[in-house]
Amino acid sequence: MNKQQMKLANYGTTINAVVEATQDNQEKMAPLFEPLRKAIDENKLADYDLEAYQQTQTVFSEGTSNYEALLVKLQQVAAPVRLLGPHHTLVRDFAAFTEACKAMTASLHADRQVDVAAFNAAEKAQDEAIQKFTKQIQKISVMLS
């Protein structure tokens, strides 16, 4: 394997690992997000189980830290020259997603107090950023094959 092929293989492996870790992280947070989203929508945060709320805060904080670590991996991986543009867009989209996750986590205050406007804005920003990220992953996958 020559140097370019090794670089390409390393890049592909890193991107795949980031995608898998992102999916795993989302799977850990989704079961906690749904009941919280329902409580917010039904205006029943005061009735929400305090222990479940605190667990959600903890898992969201840990998940956001995981996303930050994945972002660093994306920023540090050497992209093949032909993928530099799409890679920079990928990193930008993942950074936006990570920032939105931070904002959502920050919207969860003590004693079941949620900044609902910030929570909703963060959710929308996450959805938009992860869709763009996914689109870039698909574009890069096509370019790699």
Image (cartoon, helix red, strand yellow):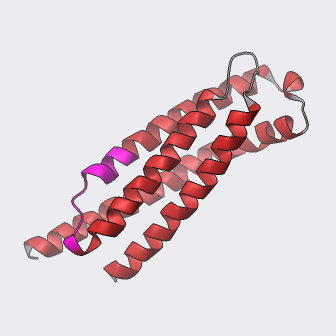
Q: Give the residue drawn at x 80%, y 40%.
A: 35
Q: Position of residue 98 (x, y in %)?
A: 49, 44
Can residue 141 be spotted in the picture? yes
Residue 129 vertical placement versus 136 (above, below): above
Q: Is residue 76 left or right of residue 35?
A: left
Residue at the extreme top of the image, as rendered = 111
Is residue 99 rendered magenta in the image? Answer: no
Q: Is residue 77 magenta?
A: yes
Location of the N terminus (image quadrant)? bottom left
State whether residue 48 is above or below residue 79.
Answer: above
Task: Tell me, yes or no, if residue 12 can be seen here.
Answer: no
Where is residue 4? Give x, y as percent. 13, 73
- Left or right of 74 on screen, residue 105: right
| Residue at the (31%, 67%) spot, across then down | 85
Q: Quadrant of the C terminus?
A: bottom left
Q: Quadrant of residue 83?
A: bottom left
> Relative to the observer, which residue lies in front, 102 or 31?
102
Q: Quadrant of residue 68?
A: top left
Q: Position of residue 32 (x, y in %)?
A: 71, 39
Of all residues, the one furthest to the left in this rendering is: 2
Q: Which residues are magenta?
A: 71-81
Dominant SS in magenta: helix
Q: Looking at the image, which residue is at 24% across and 75% down?
A: 82
- Vertical comparison of 39 with 86: above or below: above
